[in-house]
Image (cartoon, rainbow, N blue to C red):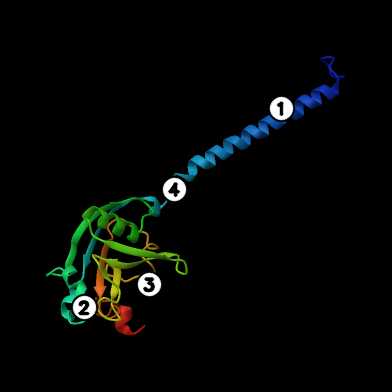
Amino acid sequence: MDRNGKKWKDNKMFFVKSRTRVTAAVCMVLFLCSFLLSGCGGGASSKGGNCTISIECSTILDHMEDLKETKKEFVPQDGWILKETQVSFKGGETVFDVLKQICGEQGIHMASRYTPLYKSYYVEGINQLYEFDCGKNSGWMYSVNGKYPNYGCSSYRLEDGDKIEWRYTCNLGSDVGDQYAEDGK
């Protein structure tokens, strides 16, 4: 018996029940804190910002003889589908997200497909101009800040101030300034 006249066994049971309740409460608090904090990302990638995007196909103008006849009506006279436009983006968004957003806002047709091997989206066509429409080495390429990444546009996370350029190539990138294509790498 304890000093209050209760049997030790009853006090022990009270202690075990109280400890279980405290442990459960602590676990619940930790779970809720981790859940709430998981939405508060840190670091540069969680910040949104502004970028610019442009879409052009001026290389086709030098290769009109190679362009499929049914596609000629989709090539603007100056080669610009979208002149440089500023776009706001959220943290974690990609080049693909911004392209999809601006094409939707401007009524520009865009077609893409997901490629599981590369875990990224591949842009097949913009403004009804698709890969291979202007020869076997033609299609869309993108650059960010003047550099052509060697991975898909949905894998490139944007940073504030990025400059995105979508360009139609007729020669695997060598005609739009891709250094890897020019160097033969």
Question: Is label 4 in a helix, a strand or a loop?
Answer: loop
Q: Is residue 23 above or below residue 134?
A: above
Q: Residue furthest left?
A: 77
Q: Secondary structure at mark 1?
A: helix
Which circle's residue, 4 or 2, is located before the other in the chain? Answer: 4
Amino acid carrying mark 2 in the image: Leu
Q: For the residues carrying marks 4 and 3, which lies nearer the camera in this image?
A: 3
Q: Nearer the viewer, mark 3 or mark 1?
A: 3
Left or right of 15: which side holds 134? left
User: Can residue 51 be seen in the rendering of this structure?
Assistant: no
Residue 67 circle label: 2
Q: CA distance from mark 4 to mark 3?
A: 27 Å
Q: Position of residue 184 (x, y in %)?
A: 34, 85
For the point 86% across and 20% down, the residue is: 7
Mark with earlier residue (3, 1) = 1
Q: What residue do we see at 36% from left, 83% from top?
A: 185
**Image location (x, y in percent) of residue 22:** 67, 31
- Report the mark closest to the observer, 4 or 2: 2
Q: Which residue is mark 1?
A: 18
- The residue indicated by pointer 4 is 41
Circle 3 residue: 150
Disc 1 versus disc 2: distance between alpha carbons?
79 Å
Query: Mark 4: few, some, or many residues within 10 Å (few <14, many ≥20)?
Result: few
In the depicted structure, whether residue 41 falls above or below residue 20: below
State whether residue 63 is above or below residue 21: below
Q: Secondary structure at mark 2?
A: loop
